[in-house]
Protein backbone atom coordinates (compact mmCIF):
# COMPACT_ATOMS: atom_id res chain seq x y z
CA UNK A 1 0.00 0.00 0.00
CA UNK A 2 1.47 3.37 -1.00
CA UNK A 3 0.69 6.62 0.79
CA UNK A 4 2.91 8.93 -1.30
CA UNK A 5 0.16 11.32 -2.33
CA UNK A 6 -1.27 11.56 1.19
CA UNK A 7 2.20 12.33 2.56
CA UNK A 8 2.61 15.11 0.01
CA UNK A 9 -0.90 16.44 0.65
CA UNK A 10 -0.31 16.51 4.40
CA UNK A 11 2.93 18.45 3.98
CA UNK A 12 1.14 21.03 1.86
CA UNK A 13 -1.82 21.25 4.25
CA UNK A 14 0.43 21.89 7.24
CA UNK A 15 1.74 25.06 5.59
CA UNK A 16 -1.67 26.71 5.70
CA UNK A 17 -3.81 24.81 8.23
CA UNK A 18 -2.75 24.32 11.87
CA UNK A 19 -1.58 20.72 12.05
CA UNK A 20 -2.82 20.27 8.50
CA UNK A 21 -6.35 19.43 9.67
CA UNK A 22 -9.59 21.13 10.58
CA UNK A 23 -10.29 18.81 13.52
CA UNK A 24 -7.37 17.47 15.60
CA UNK A 25 -7.97 13.68 15.62
CA UNK A 26 -7.84 13.63 11.85
CA UNK A 27 -4.08 14.21 12.01
CA UNK A 28 -3.44 10.57 13.10
CA UNK A 29 -1.08 12.00 15.71
CA UNK A 30 -1.76 9.44 18.42
CA UNK A 31 -1.31 6.56 15.99
CA UNK A 32 1.91 8.18 14.74
CA UNK A 33 1.09 7.93 11.06
CA UNK A 34 0.60 10.29 8.18
CA UNK A 35 -3.16 10.82 7.82
CA UNK A 36 -4.73 9.43 4.68
CA UNK A 37 -6.38 12.09 2.55
CA UNK A 38 -9.74 11.00 1.22
CA UNK A 39 -10.79 11.31 -2.37
CA UNK A 40 -14.25 9.74 -2.36
CA UNK A 41 -16.51 7.24 -0.65
CA UNK A 42 -19.57 5.18 -1.49
CA UNK A 43 -21.60 2.91 0.75
CA UNK A 44 -19.24 1.32 3.25
CA UNK A 45 -16.16 1.97 1.11
CA UNK A 46 -13.78 4.89 1.34
CA UNK A 47 -10.88 5.63 -1.05
CA UNK A 48 -7.80 7.74 -0.38
CA UNK A 49 -5.98 9.89 -2.92
CA UNK A 50 -3.38 7.15 -3.46
CA UNK A 51 -6.20 4.88 -4.65
CA UNK A 52 -6.22 2.68 -1.54
CA UNK A 53 -9.62 1.24 -0.70
CA UNK A 54 -10.85 0.71 2.85
CA UNK A 55 -14.00 -0.61 4.47
CA UNK A 56 -15.01 2.35 6.59
CA UNK A 57 -15.93 1.81 10.26
CA UNK A 58 -15.65 5.50 11.18
CA UNK A 59 -18.54 6.71 9.00
CA UNK A 60 -17.53 10.37 9.44
CA UNK A 61 -17.51 9.69 13.21
CA UNK A 62 -20.99 8.24 13.22
CA UNK A 63 -23.45 10.10 11.04
CA UNK A 64 -23.32 7.96 7.90
CA UNK A 65 -25.55 5.26 9.24
CA UNK A 66 -26.73 4.38 5.70
CA UNK A 67 -23.19 4.60 4.32
CA UNK A 68 -21.56 7.23 2.13
CA UNK A 69 -23.16 9.07 -0.76
CA UNK A 70 -26.53 7.32 -0.57
CA UNK A 71 -28.47 8.00 -3.76
CA UNK A 72 -31.63 9.16 -1.99
CA UNK A 73 -29.77 11.58 0.23
CA UNK A 74 -27.74 12.94 -2.68
CA UNK A 75 -30.93 13.42 -4.70
CA UNK A 76 -32.56 15.31 -1.83
CA UNK A 77 -29.53 17.61 -1.40
CA UNK A 78 -29.37 18.20 -5.12
CA UNK A 79 -33.06 19.00 -5.37
CA UNK A 80 -32.82 21.46 -2.49
CA UNK A 81 -29.67 23.09 -3.88
CA UNK A 82 -31.38 23.81 -7.18
CA UNK A 83 -33.76 26.08 -5.27
CA UNK A 84 -31.03 27.98 -3.43
CA UNK A 85 -28.59 27.14 -0.68
CA UNK A 86 -29.64 29.46 2.14
CA UNK A 87 -32.28 32.13 2.65
CA UNK A 88 -31.94 33.26 6.26
CA UNK A 89 -35.73 32.96 6.38
CA UNK A 90 -38.01 30.14 7.51
CA UNK A 91 -38.75 27.20 5.24
CA UNK A 92 -41.19 24.32 5.52
CA UNK A 93 -38.20 21.97 5.53
CA UNK A 94 -37.47 23.09 9.07
CA UNK A 95 -40.94 22.30 10.34
CA UNK A 96 -40.86 18.92 8.63
CA UNK A 97 -37.51 18.15 10.23
CA UNK A 98 -38.74 19.27 13.66
CA UNK A 99 -41.90 17.16 13.27
CA UNK A 100 -39.82 14.09 12.49
CA UNK A 101 -37.55 14.61 15.50
CA UNK A 102 -40.49 15.27 17.83
CA UNK A 103 -42.24 12.14 16.57
CA UNK A 104 -39.15 9.95 16.92
CA UNK A 105 -37.69 11.26 20.20
CA UNK A 106 -39.90 10.47 23.18
CA UNK A 107 -38.98 13.48 25.31
CA UNK A 108 -38.57 16.14 22.63
CA UNK A 109 -41.66 18.35 22.34
CA UNK A 110 -39.93 21.26 20.61
CA UNK A 111 -36.58 21.41 18.89
CA UNK A 112 -34.20 24.08 17.62
CA UNK A 113 -31.77 23.36 14.78
CA UNK A 114 -28.14 24.47 14.94
CA UNK A 115 -25.05 23.70 12.86
CA UNK A 116 -23.00 21.26 14.95
CA UNK A 117 -23.02 19.14 18.07
CA UNK A 118 -20.87 21.77 19.76
CA UNK A 119 -23.48 24.44 19.18
CA UNK A 120 -26.22 22.13 20.40
CA UNK A 121 -24.55 21.43 23.75
CA UNK A 122 -23.42 25.04 24.28
CA UNK A 123 -26.94 26.26 23.63
CA UNK A 124 -28.55 23.56 25.78
CA UNK A 125 -26.53 24.50 28.85
CA UNK A 126 -27.23 28.21 28.33
CA UNK A 127 -30.91 27.33 28.18
CA UNK A 128 -30.63 25.14 31.28
CA UNK A 129 -28.95 28.00 33.13
CA UNK A 130 -31.55 30.49 31.94
CA UNK A 131 -34.39 28.20 32.90
CA UNK A 132 -33.14 27.22 36.35
CA UNK A 133 -31.48 30.57 37.10
CA UNK A 134 -28.47 28.62 38.35
CA UNK A 135 -24.92 28.70 37.01
CA UNK A 136 -23.07 25.45 37.64
CA UNK A 137 -23.16 22.38 35.45
CA UNK A 138 -22.02 18.84 36.11
CA UNK A 139 -20.14 16.97 33.41
CA UNK A 140 -18.42 13.61 33.49
CA UNK A 141 -14.68 13.21 33.19
CA UNK A 142 -13.92 11.76 29.76
CA UNK A 143 -17.28 12.70 28.26
CA UNK A 144 -17.00 15.00 25.27
CA UNK A 145 -19.63 17.55 24.37
CA UNK A 146 -17.87 19.51 21.65
CA UNK A 147 -15.40 22.32 22.12
CA UNK A 148 -17.49 24.87 24.03
CA UNK A 149 -15.49 26.47 26.86
CA UNK A 150 -17.57 24.86 29.59
CA UNK A 151 -16.83 21.39 28.25
CA UNK A 152 -13.07 21.48 27.69
CA UNK A 153 -12.44 20.44 31.23
CA UNK A 154 -11.38 16.82 31.55
CA UNK A 155 -12.86 16.33 28.10
CA UNK A 156 -12.79 13.11 26.12
CA UNK A 157 -12.32 12.39 22.42
CA UNK A 158 -9.42 14.22 20.71
CA UNK A 159 -8.73 16.07 23.94
CA UNK A 160 -7.69 12.91 25.81
CA UNK A 161 -6.17 11.40 22.70
CA UNK A 162 -3.81 14.36 22.46
CA UNK A 163 -3.32 14.61 26.22
CA UNK A 164 -4.94 18.05 26.50
CA UNK A 165 -8.22 17.49 28.36
CA UNK A 166 -8.08 21.01 29.86
CA UNK A 167 -7.57 23.56 27.13
CA UNK A 168 -5.66 26.80 27.61
CA UNK A 169 -7.96 29.66 26.67
CA UNK A 170 -10.80 28.45 28.88
CA UNK A 171 -11.19 31.02 31.65
CA UNK A 172 -11.02 30.17 35.35
CA UNK A 173 -14.58 31.41 35.67
CA UNK A 174 -15.79 28.96 33.10
CA UNK A 175 -13.82 26.12 34.64
CA UNK A 176 -15.22 26.90 38.08
CA UNK A 177 -18.76 26.59 36.83
CA UNK A 178 -18.11 23.12 35.43
CA UNK A 179 -18.17 20.50 38.14
CA UNK A 180 -16.67 17.12 37.40
CA UNK A 181 -18.16 13.76 38.25
CA UNK A 182 -17.11 10.22 37.43
CA UNK A 183 -19.04 8.36 34.78
CA UNK A 184 -20.95 5.43 36.26
CA UNK A 185 -20.54 6.79 39.79
CA UNK A 186 -23.77 8.16 41.24
CA UNK A 187 -21.94 8.84 44.50
CA UNK A 188 -19.66 11.31 42.74
CA UNK A 189 -22.73 13.15 41.41
CA UNK A 190 -24.58 13.12 44.72
CA UNK A 191 -21.49 14.51 46.44
CA UNK A 192 -21.44 17.52 44.10
CA UNK A 193 -25.12 18.20 44.72
CA UNK A 194 -24.52 17.96 48.47
CA UNK A 195 -21.65 20.43 48.27
CA UNK A 196 -23.17 22.89 45.82
CA UNK A 197 -26.44 23.33 47.56
CA UNK A 198 -28.92 24.54 44.94
CA UNK A 199 -26.44 26.00 42.43
CA UNK A 200 -26.44 23.24 39.84
CA UNK A 201 -28.44 24.01 36.71
CA UNK A 202 -27.90 20.74 34.89
CA UNK A 203 -26.13 17.44 34.58
CA UNK A 204 -24.98 16.74 31.03
CA UNK A 205 -24.06 13.19 30.12
CA UNK A 206 -23.36 11.00 27.14
CA UNK A 207 -25.93 8.30 28.02
CA UNK A 208 -23.56 5.80 26.42
CA UNK A 209 -20.06 7.21 26.53
CA UNK A 210 -18.46 7.23 23.14
CA UNK A 211 -15.58 9.59 23.69
CA UNK A 212 -13.41 7.67 26.14
CA UNK A 213 -13.95 4.68 23.94
CA UNK A 214 -17.39 3.12 24.25
CA UNK A 215 -18.37 2.73 27.89
CA UNK A 216 -22.00 1.77 28.54
CA UNK A 217 -23.93 3.05 31.52
CA UNK A 218 -24.01 0.61 34.45
CA UNK A 219 -27.51 -0.64 35.27
CA UNK A 220 -29.21 2.03 37.35
CA UNK A 221 -26.76 4.82 36.48
CA UNK A 222 -29.01 6.79 34.14
CA UNK A 223 -32.04 6.13 36.37
CA UNK A 224 -30.02 7.44 39.32
CA UNK A 225 -29.06 10.60 37.45
CA UNK A 226 -32.72 11.19 36.67
CA UNK A 227 -33.62 10.82 40.33
CA UNK A 228 -30.84 13.08 41.59
CA UNK A 229 -31.70 15.82 39.07
CA UNK A 230 -35.41 15.66 39.85
CA UNK A 231 -34.78 15.72 43.60
CA UNK A 232 -32.57 18.80 43.25
CA UNK A 233 -34.48 20.81 40.63
CA UNK A 234 -31.64 20.45 38.10
CA UNK A 235 -32.14 19.54 34.45
CA UNK A 236 -30.86 16.29 33.01
CA UNK A 237 -29.34 16.74 29.56
CA UNK A 238 -28.67 13.70 27.41
CA UNK A 239 -26.01 14.42 24.83
CA UNK A 240 -27.21 12.08 22.10
CA UNK A 241 -24.96 13.46 19.37
CA UNK A 242 -23.64 9.92 18.87
CA UNK A 243 -26.46 7.76 20.25
CA UNK A 244 -29.38 9.67 18.72
CA UNK A 245 -31.05 7.59 15.97
CA UNK A 246 -28.19 5.08 16.30
CA UNK A 247 -29.23 2.95 19.27
CA UNK A 248 -32.92 3.30 18.49
CA UNK A 249 -35.19 5.75 16.67
CA UNK A 250 -35.49 7.60 19.94
CA UNK A 251 -31.82 7.25 20.86
CA UNK A 252 -30.46 6.10 24.20
CA UNK A 253 -33.47 7.55 26.00
CA UNK A 254 -35.71 5.09 24.20
CA UNK A 255 -33.15 2.27 24.46
CA UNK A 256 -32.84 2.64 28.23
CA UNK A 257 -36.28 4.12 28.93
CA UNK A 258 -35.07 7.27 30.72
CA UNK A 259 -36.54 10.75 30.21
CA UNK A 260 -34.05 13.61 30.14
CA UNK A 261 -35.29 17.23 30.23
CA UNK A 262 -33.17 18.30 27.27
CA UNK A 263 -31.53 16.35 24.48
CA UNK A 264 -28.72 17.37 22.16
CA UNK A 265 -28.45 15.85 18.72
CA UNK A 266 -26.07 16.10 15.79
CA UNK A 267 -24.36 14.15 13.07
CA UNK A 268 -26.98 11.60 12.00
CA UNK A 269 -29.74 14.18 11.54
CA UNK A 270 -27.57 15.94 8.97
CA UNK A 271 -26.98 12.87 6.87
CA UNK A 272 -23.35 14.00 6.66
CA UNK A 273 -24.04 17.73 6.40
CA UNK A 274 -23.20 20.13 9.25
CA UNK A 275 -26.18 19.95 11.61
CA UNK A 276 -27.00 19.81 15.27
CA UNK A 277 -30.18 20.25 17.28
CA UNK A 278 -31.38 20.53 20.83
CA UNK A 279 -34.81 19.95 22.15
CA UNK A 280 -36.94 18.96 25.08
CA UNK A 281 -39.95 19.95 27.08
CA UNK A 282 -42.04 22.78 25.60
CA UNK A 283 -41.93 24.70 28.82
CA UNK A 284 -38.13 24.80 28.75
CA UNK A 285 -37.71 25.29 24.99
CA UNK A 286 -40.12 28.24 25.05
CA UNK A 287 -37.57 30.11 27.16
CA UNK A 288 -35.67 30.64 23.89
CA UNK A 289 -35.80 33.89 21.94
CA UNK A 290 -37.97 35.09 20.28
CA UNK A 291 -40.52 33.64 22.76
CA UNK A 292 -38.38 33.94 25.86
CA UNK A 293 -35.23 35.73 27.00
CA UNK A 294 -32.53 33.10 26.40
CA UNK A 295 -30.72 34.13 23.24
CA UNK A 296 -29.47 31.73 20.61
CA UNK A 297 -29.35 32.24 16.86
CA UNK A 298 -27.71 31.13 13.61
CA UNK A 299 -27.54 32.51 10.08
CA UNK A 300 -27.26 29.05 8.57
CA UNK A 301 -29.36 27.21 11.17
CA UNK A 302 -32.02 25.05 9.51
CA UNK A 303 -30.11 25.33 6.24
CA UNK A 304 -32.22 23.87 3.41
CA UNK A 305 -29.52 21.47 2.14
CA UNK A 306 -28.88 20.07 5.60
CA UNK A 307 -32.62 19.84 6.29
CA UNK A 308 -33.26 18.02 3.02
CA UNK A 309 -30.50 15.53 3.81
CA UNK A 310 -31.69 15.06 7.37
CA UNK A 311 -35.37 14.67 6.50
CA UNK A 312 -34.43 12.01 3.96
CA UNK A 313 -32.17 10.24 6.44
CA UNK A 314 -34.87 10.13 9.13
CA UNK A 315 -37.53 9.11 6.61
CA UNK A 316 -35.31 6.27 5.44
CA UNK A 317 -34.88 5.12 9.05
CA UNK A 318 -38.68 5.18 9.46
CA UNK A 319 -39.23 3.27 6.25
CA UNK A 320 -36.62 0.57 6.85
CA UNK A 321 -38.41 -1.96 9.01
CA UNK A 322 -35.32 -4.03 9.77
CA UNK A 323 -33.01 -1.04 10.30
CA UNK A 324 -32.14 -1.50 13.99
CA UNK A 325 -32.40 -5.28 13.93
CA UNK A 326 -29.93 -5.40 11.03
CA UNK A 327 -27.51 -3.01 12.75
CA UNK A 328 -27.73 -5.19 15.85
CA UNK A 329 -27.30 -8.43 13.90
CA UNK A 330 -24.22 -7.22 12.03
CA UNK A 331 -22.66 -5.65 15.10
CA UNK A 332 -23.32 -8.80 17.15
CA UNK A 333 -21.70 -10.87 14.42
CA UNK A 334 -18.66 -8.60 14.53
CA UNK A 335 -18.52 -8.76 18.31
CA UNK A 336 -18.64 -12.55 18.22
CA UNK A 337 -15.88 -12.71 15.63
CA UNK A 338 -13.59 -10.36 17.56
CA UNK A 339 -14.21 -12.20 20.83
CA UNK A 340 -13.26 -15.46 19.16
CA UNK A 341 -10.09 -13.86 17.75
CA UNK A 342 -9.15 -12.47 21.17
CA UNK A 343 -9.51 -15.90 22.66
CA UNK A 344 -7.65 -17.71 19.90
CA UNK A 345 -4.75 -15.27 19.93
CA UNK A 346 -4.74 -14.95 23.73
CA UNK A 347 -4.84 -11.14 23.48
CA UNK A 348 -5.64 -9.32 26.71
CA UNK A 349 -8.33 -6.79 25.76
CA UNK A 350 -11.87 -5.73 26.60
CA UNK A 351 -14.56 -5.40 23.95
CA UNK A 352 -17.50 -3.14 24.83
CA UNK A 353 -20.55 -3.01 22.59
CA UNK A 354 -23.99 -1.44 22.71
CA UNK A 355 -25.96 -1.80 19.47
CA UNK A 356 -23.87 -0.63 16.54
CA UNK A 357 -21.18 1.12 18.59
CA UNK A 358 -18.19 -0.68 20.06
CA UNK A 359 -14.59 -0.26 21.24
CA UNK A 360 -11.80 -2.76 21.58
CA UNK A 361 -9.72 -1.62 24.56
CA UNK A 362 -6.15 -2.89 24.75
CA UNK A 363 -5.98 -3.25 28.50
CA UNK A 364 -5.10 -5.92 31.04
CA UNK A 365 -8.23 -4.96 33.03
CA UNK A 366 -11.16 -7.38 33.05
CA UNK A 367 -13.69 -4.65 32.26
CA UNK A 368 -13.91 -1.03 31.17
CA UNK A 369 -16.79 0.65 32.97
CA UNK A 370 -15.08 3.87 34.00
CA UNK A 371 -12.74 6.56 32.74
CA UNK A 372 -9.93 5.28 34.97
CA UNK A 373 -10.25 1.79 33.53
CA UNK A 374 -10.27 3.23 30.00
CA UNK A 375 -7.08 5.09 30.82
CA UNK A 376 -5.24 1.83 31.56
CA UNK A 377 -5.18 1.11 27.82
CA UNK A 378 -1.96 0.61 25.95
CA UNK A 379 -2.33 3.32 23.29
CA UNK A 380 0.91 2.20 21.64
CA UNK A 381 -0.66 -1.19 21.06
CA UNK A 382 -3.77 0.46 19.64
CA UNK A 383 -1.57 2.50 17.29
CA UNK A 384 0.00 -0.69 16.01
CA UNK A 385 -3.41 -2.36 15.71
CA UNK A 386 -4.69 0.67 13.80
CA UNK A 387 -1.77 0.52 11.35
CA UNK A 388 -2.17 -3.19 10.74
CA UNK A 389 -5.91 -2.76 10.19
CA UNK A 390 -5.39 0.14 7.78
CA UNK A 391 -2.92 -1.94 5.80
CA UNK A 392 -5.56 -4.70 5.60
CA UNK A 393 -8.02 -2.20 4.13
CA UNK A 394 -9.97 -1.48 7.32
CA UNK A 395 -10.48 2.17 8.25
CA UNK A 396 -10.84 2.57 12.03
CA UNK A 397 -10.84 5.63 14.27
CA UNK A 398 -7.24 6.79 14.70
CA UNK A 399 -7.52 6.73 18.49
CA UNK A 400 -8.13 4.18 21.24
CA UNK A 401 -10.70 6.51 22.80
CA UNK A 402 -13.33 6.47 20.06
CA UNK A 403 -15.95 4.06 18.73
CA UNK A 404 -16.21 1.71 15.83
CA UNK A 405 -19.52 2.22 14.04
CA UNK A 406 -21.41 -0.41 12.08
CA UNK A 407 -23.71 1.03 9.43
CA UNK A 408 -26.63 -0.34 7.46
CA UNK A 409 -24.38 -0.21 4.38
CA UNK A 410 -21.96 -2.81 5.76
CA UNK A 411 -22.53 -6.18 4.14
CA UNK A 412 -21.98 -9.53 5.81
CA UNK A 413 -18.91 -9.78 3.63
CA UNK A 414 -17.59 -6.48 5.06
CA UNK A 415 -18.07 -7.90 8.55
CA UNK A 416 -16.22 -11.09 7.56
CA UNK A 417 -13.38 -8.94 6.18
CA UNK A 418 -12.96 -6.95 9.37
CA UNK A 419 -13.08 -10.11 11.50
CA UNK A 420 -10.34 -11.61 9.32
CA UNK A 421 -8.28 -8.39 9.43
CA UNK A 422 -8.74 -8.22 13.20
CA UNK A 423 -7.41 -11.76 13.57
CA UNK A 424 -4.39 -11.02 11.40
CA UNK A 425 -3.67 -7.81 13.33
CA UNK A 426 -3.99 -9.53 16.72
CA UNK A 427 -1.68 -12.33 15.58
CA UNK A 428 0.91 -9.81 14.45
CA UNK A 429 0.54 -7.70 17.58
CA UNK A 430 1.49 -10.66 19.73
CA UNK A 431 4.97 -10.91 18.24
N1 LIG B 1 -21.31 15.58 21.78
C1 LIG B 1 -20.85 14.34 21.54
C2 LIG B 1 -21.32 13.21 22.38
C3 LIG B 1 -19.94 14.13 20.51
O1 LIG B 1 -19.47 12.90 20.27
C4 LIG B 1 -19.52 15.23 19.72
C5 LIG B 1 -18.53 15.08 18.59
N2 LIG B 1 -17.99 13.87 18.39
C6 LIG B 1 -20.03 16.49 20.01
C7 LIG B 1 -20.93 16.63 21.03
C8 LIG B 1 -19.63 17.68 19.20
O2 LIG B 1 -20.17 17.63 17.94
P1 LIG B 1 -19.50 18.44 16.73
O3 LIG B 1 -18.19 17.80 16.47
O4 LIG B 1 -20.50 18.28 15.61
O5 LIG B 1 -19.38 19.85 17.17
Image (cartoon, rainbow, N blue to C red):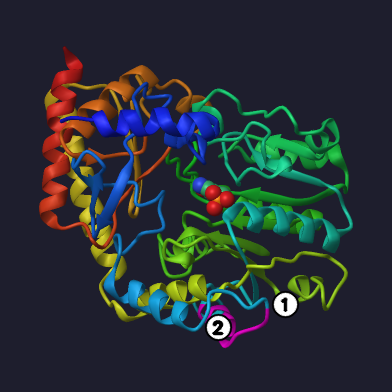
Question: Residue at 36% of width from left, 34% of height from top?
Answer: 9
In this view, 266 is above or below 16: below
| Magenta stretch: dominant secondary structure | helix
Residue 63 part of the magenta segment: no
Side of 376 relative to 266 (left or right):
left
Q: How far across and how far down the image is residue 60, in percent?
A: 39, 51
Q: Which residue is mark 1?
A: 282
Residue in the foreground of this view, choosing between 398 and 185: 398
- Label drawn at residue 43: none
In the figure, residue 258 lies in which quadrant?
bottom right
Above or below for 71 versus 217: below
The reply, left or right, for residue 4 in relation to residue 201 is left
- Side of 380 relative to 241 (left or right): left
What percent of the width, then of the height, locates residue 257?
51, 64
- Rounded to the nearest angstrom, the CA distance separating label 2 from label 1 is 14 Å
Give the magenta part as a residue range: 89-100
What residue do we see at 49% from left, 49% from top? 208
Q: Is residue 91 magenta?
A: yes
Query: Where does label 2 land, which residue?
Result: 99
Question: Looking at the image, is 384 positioned above or below residue 22?
Answer: above
Element under disc 2: helix
Against 295, residue 26 (above or below) is above
Which of the image's four quarters has the N terminus? Answer: top left
Amino acid sequence: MSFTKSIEAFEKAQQVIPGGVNSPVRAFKSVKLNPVFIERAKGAEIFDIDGNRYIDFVASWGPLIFGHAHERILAAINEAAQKGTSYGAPTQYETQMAELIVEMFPTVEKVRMVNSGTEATMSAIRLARGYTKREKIVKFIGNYHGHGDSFLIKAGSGAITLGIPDSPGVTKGNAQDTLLAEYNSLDSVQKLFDEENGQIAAVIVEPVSGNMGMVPPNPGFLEGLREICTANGALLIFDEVITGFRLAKGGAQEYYGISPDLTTLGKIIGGGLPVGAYGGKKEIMDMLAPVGPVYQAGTLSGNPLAMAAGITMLTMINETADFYSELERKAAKLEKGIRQNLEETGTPAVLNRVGSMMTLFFTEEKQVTSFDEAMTCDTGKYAEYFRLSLESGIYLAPSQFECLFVSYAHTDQDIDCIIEANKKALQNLKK
